[in-house]
């Protein structure tokens, strides 16, 4: 990379800087709308970030639009919790060359965290008309494995902070849908899971994640939610350098009789095992103290108080149970003066219900006192929900089906989301 800035991790590239060398970025993983790349070049500044580039999708917002939306809409609401996201300019050939590499390279079947890569998604290439990318904070774990301890002057490898685990999940609907009937027993998230048949069978006895548990403020319910999240599919990644079947780590520490020789690797392995065993306690404690869940709940509520239906729509539906068309609803909204923007912003509410929470767990060994941990928490996946009618129709249709099928008031499903108690 051609840059005049010194190799200091805190120094951003000079103004007017373009990313020019696609060989410095390797495929990391991807979502429906974008692909993430990890930096493998020499400049320490970029190592804290992943490069997010958008795929070629008709009608998708540009990177500059998305960046503006994040800064104007969500940064003021979420403060320090928002995942850092900087705009970076790209050389003209940068994206086309990455596309060439994507076509020729086999990205494999799994991404960095062991999640299968959706083949249909993986075949979509980057938008070549785009001249900007986003540098997003890297919330993946295990970067400590690539650090050079000697270079950083770390004398005691136990003292080093290790980014050892990442937990990623969608908190979903942290307050009940305003469209649920008054006598609801299931929350929006649990009702949808049940309706779509994606839940476990009751006999499996595996807890399901209920956002109202996480949001309850009660120790026991928070712990229940954390336990369910940790048992979910691929929610946790622990960066343990030692494979499970390799039990040599313990032996290495006993070399020379009882004088324990602790290598950095053996310490990491030991910390990883301790961390694994204490994650539920650690995260429960975190969620009891942190303001992130109450904040998200408050925002979801503030922007989505009215739900996806106006009362007039509901009245109309109760007679026919047919979903009115977009035009009918727009007409109705105009008629009853229901169209004020601002706080009742369903697009913002829905984005906040669909965001992801990233928890990065840093651990280190305290001299003679076991493990010390701290948790970094960021909100990501705040994708711009463009105001296309299709999505609004979809949301309304889900609510209609939930109400029509009585999913909010199901009694024989083993739980009551109001109390967090089983109802068997
Ligand atoms: Zn629930």
Image: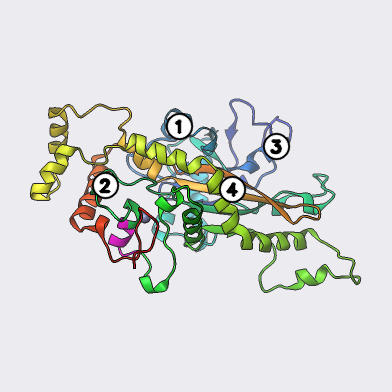
User: What residue is rendered at 60% in x and 54% in y?
Assistant: 282
Q: Quadrant of residue 207?
A: bottom left
Q: What's the image's color scheme? A: rainbow
Q: Nearer the viewer, mark 1 or mark 4?
A: 1
- Indicate the quadrant containing the C terminus: top left, top right, bottom left or bottom right: bottom left
Mark 1 vs 4, N-terminal side: 4
Q: Which is nearer the eye, 370 or 90?
A: 370
Q: Nearer the viewer, mark 1 or mark 3?
A: 1
Residue of label 2: 395
Mark 1 vs 3, N-terminal side: 3
Q: Is residue 163 magenta?
A: no
Q: Is residue 335 left or right of residue 131?
A: left
Residue of label 4: 38
Residue 286, compared with residue 198, is above or below; it is above
Q: Residues within 10 Å of mark 4 (few under 14, many from 20)?
A: some
The image position of residue 69, as x and y in percent, is 42, 31
Tags 4 and 3 touching, CB below 8 Å: no
Residue range highlighted in magenta: 191-198
Tags 1 and 4 touching, CB below 8 Å: no
Residue 132, compared with residue 367, is above or below; it is above
Q: Nearer the viewer, mark 4 or mark 3?
A: 3
Q: Secondary structure at mark 1?
A: helix
Tags 1 and 3 touching, CB below 8 Å: no
Tags 2 and 1 touching, CB below 8 Å: no
Q: Residues within 10 Å of mark 1 (few under 14, many from 20)?
A: some
Per the model, the C-alpha gap separating discs 2 and 4 is 35 Å
Per the model, the C-alpha gap separating discs 2 and 1 is 24 Å
Q: Which mark is residue 9?
A: 3
């Amino acid at each position: 990379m051609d840059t005049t800035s010194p190799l200091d991790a805190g120094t951003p590239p000079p103004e007017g800087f373009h990313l020019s060398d696609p060989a410095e970025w390797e495929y990391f993983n991807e979502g429906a709308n974008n692909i993430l790349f990890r930096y493998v070049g020499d400049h320490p500044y970029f190592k804290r970030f992943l490069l997010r580039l958008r795929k070629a999708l008709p009608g998708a917002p540009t990177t500059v639009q998305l960046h503006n939306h994040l800064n104007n809409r969500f940064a003021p609401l979420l403060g320090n919790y928002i995942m850092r996201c900087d705009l970076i300019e790209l050389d003209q050939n940068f994206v086309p060359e990455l596309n060439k590499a994507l076509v020729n390279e086999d990205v494999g079947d799994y991404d960095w965290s062991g999640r299968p890569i959706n083949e249909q998604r993986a075949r979509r290439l980057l938008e070549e008309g785009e001249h900007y990318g986003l540098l997003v904070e890297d919330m993946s774990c295990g970067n400590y494995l690539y650090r050079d301890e000697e270079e950083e002057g770390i004398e005691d490898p136990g003292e080093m902070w290790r980014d050892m685990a990442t937990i990623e999940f969608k908190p979903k609907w942290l307050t009940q849908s305003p469209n649920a009937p008054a006598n609801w027993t299931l929350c929006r998230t649990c009702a949808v899971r049940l309706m779509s048949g994606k839940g476990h069978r009751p006999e499996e006895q595996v807890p399901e994640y209920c956002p109202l548990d996480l949001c309850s403020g009660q120790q026991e319910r928070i712990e229940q939610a954390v336990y369910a999240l940790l048992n979910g599919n691929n929610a946790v990644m622990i960066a343990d350098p030692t494979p499970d079947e390799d039990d040599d780590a313990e032996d290495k520490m006993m070399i020379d009789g009882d004088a324990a020789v602790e290598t950095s690797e053996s310490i990491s392995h030991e910390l990883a095992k301790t961390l694994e065993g204490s994650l539920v306690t650690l995260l429960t404690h975190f969620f009891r103290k942190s303001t992130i869940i109450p904040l998200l709940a408050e925002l979801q509520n503030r922007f989505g108080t009215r739900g996806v239906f106006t009362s007039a729509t509901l009245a109309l539906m109760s007679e026919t149970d047919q979903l009115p068309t977009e035009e009918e609803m727009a007409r109705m909204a105009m008629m009853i003066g229901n169209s004020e923007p601002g706080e009742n912003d369903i697009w913002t509410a829905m984005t906040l219900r669909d965001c992801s929470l990233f928890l990065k767990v840093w651990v280190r060994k305290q001299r003679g006192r076991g493990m010390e941990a701290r948790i970094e928490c960021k909100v990501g996946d705040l994708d711009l929900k463009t105001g296309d009618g299709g999505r609004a129709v979809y949301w309304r249709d889900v609510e209609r089906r939930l109400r029509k099928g009585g999913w909010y008031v199901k009694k024989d499903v083993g739980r009551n989301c109001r109390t967090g108690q089983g109802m068997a």
